Image (cartoon, grey):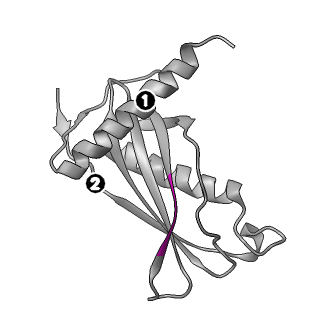
Amino acid sequence: MIEKESIEVINTHFVFPNDTNNYGTIFGGKLVELMDLTGALSALRFSGENVVTASIEALDFKIPINLADIVELRSRVIYTAKTSMVVKVDVYREKKQGSTKDFCCRGYFIFVAIDENGRPTPIPKLKTVSEEDKRFWKIGETIKSGAHERRTTSL
C-alpha cells in the first residue's frame, strides 16, 4: 500500500455583504460551505481521486467573523481508512490584511474517494511523521469510528 504525507491546503475568502446575516456576521452555512470546499481540496489532493462529503462533525463557532473580514481556512488529512479520510479544517479571521489571525473554529469532515462510476475507491495510507500527526490520527480514528457507529445504528 502506498503511504503519503498530508499537505496543508490554505484557502482565503473576503466576507462580502451577501455572505452575512442581519447581524453583519458570516452565515454559519456559508462558513460550512467554505470549510467543506477547502477540506475537499485536501482530500482530493491527498487521494488523487474525486471525493464526496460523507460526514461533518459538530462545529462550535468561537468568535464571530464580520463583514469585510478575511477568512483563512487551513485543511489537512489527519486519518485514512480504505476509501475514506478525515480532514481537519481550521478557520481564522483577519480584521484587515496583515493583522493578527484569530482562531474561529475547527471542523472535521469525512470524505470518501470515488471512481468514475461513483463507487468508493481505495486511497493511499496517511504517513504520520510528527507527534502532532499521531495525535490527530487518534482524533480522526475516533471521529471515523463514531460516524460508522451512527450509520450502522438503526433509528
Residue 109 at x, y = what percent? Answer: 49, 42
- Above or below: residue 77 compared with residue 62: above
Residue 28 at x, y = what percent? Answer: 69, 57
Horizontal relation, residue 39 to residue 70: left or right? left
Residue 31 at x, y = what percent? Answer: 62, 59
- Answer with the quarter of the image where residue 19 lies: bottom right
What residue did someone put label 1 on? 144
Mark 2, Cα crowd under 10 Å, few <14 / some 14-19 / many 20+, is some
Dominant secondary structure of the magenta stretch? Answer: strand
Horizontal relation, residue 13 to residue 129: left or right? right
Q: In what element is the residue under mark 2?
A: loop
- Above or below: residue 42 compared with residue 85: below
Choose between 15 and 120: the one closer to the eye: 15
Instruction: Work out whether mark 1 precedes mark 2 in sequence or the reverse, and give the earlier one.
Output: 2
For the residue marked with disc 1, what is the amino acid? Lys
What residue did someone put label 2 on? 7
**The magenta segment:** 102-106
Q: Are marks 1 and 2 in contact (CB under 8 Å)?
A: no
Horizontal relation, residue 58 to residue 51: left or right? right
- Quadrant occupied by the C terminus: top right
Choose between 120 and 100: the one closer to the eye: 100
